[in-house]
Image (cartoon, rainbow, N blue to C red):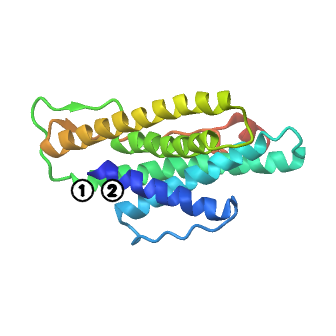
């Protein structure tokens, strides 16, 4: 199943990142460029690095200059994340380009890649909640509370994986069709962000 593969790759990425636990460690994607596996690996690596940048910037003792640099990195990472979602959707659009939608076919509320984006973030939540459950420097109450949250996250992954599988099956059968919209992000565009174009 597609989501089995995706979840395995996300776990692989997260484990590989935590061998170094370094936001500057270069990504070494083991899959052939252009393959769906390559795109999934790259997507989760972006998400994993950004997860830790978000942690770093919340350090109450962080130097303000360093915090601004990290905020800029997070902005760039958000753009990379969006671009990668669009690459995955483009891959799937091409894969199913010859499927003829049925007359009653409907469009989904989100594209497969945006659902995959949520699955990628969910893998990170599960990993880090598992770490909290295993901590030995906290009260038992903390571990119990985190185990309850982990149980919910695991159920959420099962449900989201099933929903993605159903969506893909519907697209393959022509019951639903894909339609993508490029994300009209304005804050990084010097011609659309008034703060940027007013500074000229």
Question: Is residue 118 or residue 153 the one in the foreground?
Answer: 153
Residue 181 visible in the picture: no
- Is disc 2 placed on a helix, strand or loop? helix
Question: Is residue 158 or residue 141 the one in the foreground?
Answer: 141
Residue 61 relative to residue 34: left or right: right
Q: Give the image quarter of residue 194.
A: top right
Q: Which mark is residue 91?
A: 2
Q: Position of residue 156 (x, y in %)?
A: 41, 33
Residue 4 relative to residue 186: left or right: left
Question: Is residue 166 or residue 93 the one in the foreground?
Answer: 166
Q: Position of residue 191 (x, y in %)?
A: 64, 43
Q: Which mark is residue 37?
A: none
Residue 120 visible in the picture: yes
- Is disc 1 placed on a helix, strand or loop? helix
Please state, as top left, top right, bottom left or bottom right, where the C terminus lies in the image: top right
Whole-angstrom CA distance, mark 2 to mark 1, is 6 Å
- Mark 1, other Cα within 10 Å: few <14 / some 14–19 / many ≥20: few
- Kindly identify which residue carries mark 1: 95
Which residue is rendered at x = 30% and y = 35% of the image?
163
Q: Position of residue 28 (x, y in %)?
A: 54, 71
């Amino acid at each position: 199943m597609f989501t089995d593969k995706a979840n395995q790759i996300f776990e692989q990425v997260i484990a590989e990142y935590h061998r170094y636990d370094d936001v500057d460690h270069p990504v070494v994607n083991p899959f052939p460029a252009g393959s769906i596996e390559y795109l999934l690996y790259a997507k989760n690596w972006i998400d994993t690095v950004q997860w830790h940048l978000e942690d770093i910037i919340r350090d109450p003792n962080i130097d303000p200059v360093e915090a601004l640099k990290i905020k800029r990195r997070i902005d760039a990472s958000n753009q990379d994340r969006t671009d990668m979602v669009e690459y995955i959707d483009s891959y799937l659009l091409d894969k199913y380009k010859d499927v003829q939608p049925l007359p009653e076919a409907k469009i989904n509320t989100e594209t497969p890649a945006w659902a995959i984006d949520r699955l990628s973030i969910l893998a990170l939540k599960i990993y880090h909640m598992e770490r909290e459950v295993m901590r030995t420097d906290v009260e038992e109450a903390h571990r119990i509370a985190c185990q309850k949250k982990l149980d919910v996250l695991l159920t959420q992954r099962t449900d989201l994986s099933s929903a993605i599988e159903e969506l893909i099956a519907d697209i393959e059968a022509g019951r639903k069709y894909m339609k993508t919209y490029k994300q009209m992000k304005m804050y990084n565009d010097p011609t659309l962000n008034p703060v940027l174009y007013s500074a000229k």
